[in-house]
Amino acid sequence: MPTETADLQRVAQLFHALSDETRLAVIEMLRNGERCVCELQGDLDAAQSRLSFHLKVLKDANLVVDRKDGRWVHYSLNTDSLAELADVIARLAPPQRHSTVRSSQSCCT
Amino acid sequence: MPTETADLQRVAQLFHALSDETRLAVIEMLRNGERCVCELQGDLDAAQSRLSFHLKVLKDANLVVDRKDGRWVHYSLNTDSLAELADVIARLAPPQRHSTVRSSQSCCT
DNA sequence: TGATTATATCAACATTCGTTGATTAATCAA
DNA sequence: TTGATTAATCAACGAATGTTGATATAATCA
């Protein structure tokens, strides 16, 4: 099951979105449900524009969804993309049990 | 189960290592077993120093291990860190089924 | 209406990351 | 030995990313 190029791009985007401590902290906070930006800001003590930037990265990667409510915007995890992620990881791992050792003594001898 | 700061750093490192298409392609190649650098170089048509750079990132993140054999160096997946990764993803997901909606109508009303 | 609040966007800048070409170190072959 | 080969490292550079402070937009409140 070879990974396609378009697929590689998407996978890279997903991992990139998760490769920053601030964004991981945001996800951590969203695990227990929806939070509004102001709450996240307080708990993470991140400057407003900085947080907004990171939320955009997460949203562009489809890891979170936002919901506008009056002047507030609430963010929550997109569980679909977390499932996608689990699937991706599964596909990174070696296919069968005993194939890891074998297979390529071939190369350069 | 709150994620510690040191832990966040490690998780970010892991995801960062996976956030590049070249490195993902390398991992893809290693799924079927050990490969020597020269093989990877051929199949990915990447300049020697470029590939070396990416292999170092993967190795620093403990995602691959290397084995020297004469003039050649063989790389293979570190299955432990793939397991670690699966665990990390599991911990990103919301804890229980029905808790996602609840929990924070509290914020700003 | 005008003032205030919540959030997004922008421009400027600093930092990090990835690429390239050159050099180095180690191993092997003649 | 000497020369060739494999791979790591380094320096220089450009590109991408993240931060900051300022401004813009939209919603609410007085």
Image (cartoon, coloured by chain):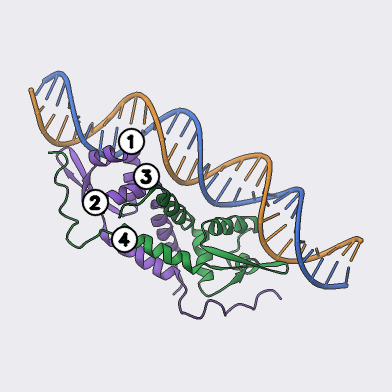
Chain colours: A purple, B green, C blue, D orange
Residue at the disc numbered 2 = A76
Mark 2 vs mark 3: which is more N-terminal? 3
Mark 1 vs mark 2: which is more N-terminal? 1
Q: Are marks 2 and 4 on the same chain?
A: yes
Q: Quadrant of the N terminus of chain B?
A: bottom left
Q: Are marks 1 and 3 on the same chain?
A: yes
Q: Secondary structure at mark 3?
A: helix
Mark 4 vs mark 3: which is more N-terminal? 3
A26 or B46, nearer to the observer:
A26
> Relative to residue A103, is residue C12 drawn left or right?
left
Q: Which mark is residue A82?
A: 4
* Dot 3: chain letter: A
Q: CA distance from mark 4 to mark 3?
A: 18 Å
Residue in view at x 56 percent, y 77 percent: A101
B12 or D21, nearer to the observer:
B12
Task: Point out residue A108 in the picture as x, y percentages from the top left corner.
Answer: 69, 74
* Dot 2: chain letter: A
Residue at the disc numbered 1 = A49
Residue in view at x 19 percent, y 56 percent: B100
- Displayed quadrant of residue B45: bottom right
Q: Are marks 1 and 2 on the same chain?
A: yes
Q: Quadrant of the C terminus of chain B?
A: top left
Q: Are marks 4 and 3 on the same chain?
A: yes
Q: Which mark is residue A22?
A: 3
Tag 4 and tag 3, C-beta contact below 8 Å: no
Q: Secondary structure at mark 2?
A: strand
Does residue A101 appear in this view?
A: yes
Tag 2 and tag 4, C-beta contact below 8 Å: no
Task: Point out residue A13 in the picture as x, y percentages from the top left corner.
Answer: 41, 55
